Amino acid sequence: GVALDDGQVGGGGGAEVDLAGLKGSKLWYCGMHKYGWPVHENFTRVFAQHRGFYDALVRETADSRTYGLREPVLSDTSDWHPKSRATSYSRPYESYTWTDGFAGVMGVPFAMETDLAAPGVWALSGRRQVERLSDAELRQILSHHVLVDAAAAAALDRRGLSALTGVRTDDQPPLFNGEVSADGRQTYAYSHETVPHLLPDPKARVLSYLTYSPFSGVAGERVSPASTVFENALGGRVIVSTFNPAIDVFCRFNEPRKVQFEQFLAELNGEPLKAVVGNLQDVLAVAREKADGSLLLAVVNLNYDAIDTLELTVAKVPARVEAMADDGSWQALDFRCEGRTLKLKRPLACYEAAVFRLTPAN
C-alpha cells in the first residue's frame, strides 16, 4: 500500500518516494504478524529482492523536482477526512480532470502540486475545481501557462476572471456533432455533449472549431470556436478547450485526441514535453527532472495487453537511456529513433512498472 504522509518511514522495511508531487511511503510487512495472522513469506522475499530498487529511487529523486502537467492540490486540508464533516467531505483533488481523466492514462507525465508558484504548464478542470480555489489562487495559476476546459472557463467567467482566459461564455450551447482543427486538416470525434458557447476575445487565436454535419460522411459546417489560446495581462498563456476529460470515453481515447492534447501542451510549454509515452494503450507516466538535466520517468502499463516495445515521444533525442534494475542499478538500453520517437526493447507486462533515466546530449 501507499501511505501519503509527511514522508517519514516508520517500522520495518520501507522507502519514501516522491514522483508525482506527493510524498509517499511503501510499507512492507516483513517477518511479522498482522492482526494476529502470519504474513506470507513472499512479502519478505519480494522486499529483499527489491530493497535496492527503492533505496536507489529515493537517492535518485533527492535532487529532482516534479515534471509534467501540474494540477493544483487544495491547500485547505480541514475537510479532507471523512469524519471532519457530519454529511460530506472533500478530497484534495477532483475526478475527471486533465490529469486524472486523460494524462494519467495517456502516458503524459503529470504532477499534483501544492506550490501554486511552481513554474510549468498547469491545468484547471471543471466547475468544482474552480469553486474550491480563491480568486488569489486562481490569479496565481492563470499567471502560468494553463490548460482550461470549458466548464472551468465558464466558472472563471462567473468569477469575473474572463479577462485572464480570453474567453467569455454563455448558457446557450451550440448545436454541433464534430470538431475540426483551424487549418481543416484534422477532425475529432465528438459524442452529443452540452458545452458552453465560447465567445473569445479578439486577441485570442482559435485552434479548432465545433462543427455540425447533417449527415455522416459530409464535411461539417463551422459553428463556433472549440479551443482558443490567449496571452493575458499577467504574462500567462491560456488554452480554453470545449473538449474535456469528462466526455464520452469513445471520443476521448483515440489517437487524434492524444495528439491534440500533446499539441495543447506543446503550445503552452513553448516546445513538446521532454518525454511522453507514445503507445496507444492505457499507460501511467510520472516524471522528475534532475539538477543535471536528466529526466527520471516512471511508466506503468495499465492495460491488459503487454507492451513489447515501449515508445517514447521526446523533445530531443537523449544521449543515453537507462532502466533501473531490481537491485537499484542502472542498465543501459539500446533504442532506435524514428524522428522524435524512441523505441525501447523493454517489455512491460500488464500492470508492470519500470523506471527510466534519460540523459540529454551535451
Image (tube, grey):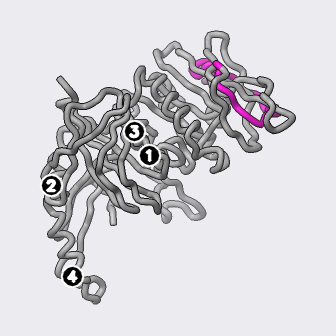
Q: Looking at the image, is mark 2 or mark 4 earlier in the sequence? A: 4
Q: Looking at the image, is mark 3 or mark 2 earlier in the sequence? A: 3
Report if residue 193 lies within the magenta region: no
Q: Which numbered marker is on residue 41?
A: 4
Asked whether residue 110 appears in the rendered view, the answer is no
Q: Is residue 214 left or right of residue 351?
A: right
Mark 1 Cα-neighbour bin, 10 Å: few <14, some 14–19, many ≥20: some
Range of residues picked out in magenta: 162-183
Q: Which numbered marker is on residue 328?
A: 2
Q: In 3D space, how far apart are the residues under numbered discs 4 and 3 (Cα atoms)?
A: 37 Å
Q: Amino acid at mark 4?
A: Glu
Q: Residue at x 22, y 34 (%)?
A: 294
Q: Looking at the image, is mark 4 or mark 3 earlier in the sequence? A: 4
Question: Disc 1 marks which residue?
Answer: 279
Whether tag 3 and tag 2 are in contact, CB under 8 A, the answer is no
Q: Quadrant of residue 317?
A: top left
Q: Residue at x 16, y 67 (%)?
A: 49
Q: Judge whether 258 appears above or below 197 on screen.
A: below
Q: Assign a secondary structure to mark 3.
A: strand
Q: Quadrant of residue 287?
A: top left
Between 54 and 75, the residue placed more toward the observer is 54
Quadrant location, the N terminus: bottom left
Report if residue 165 lies within the magenta region: yes
Asked whether residue 303 appears in the rendered view, the answer is yes
Query: Measured from the top left, where is residue 262 in percent x and y?
Result: 48, 32
Q: Looking at the image, is mark 1 or mark 2 earlier in the sequence? A: 1
Whether tag 1 and tag 2 are in contact, CB under 8 A, the answer is no
Q: Assign a secondary structure to mark 1.
A: loop
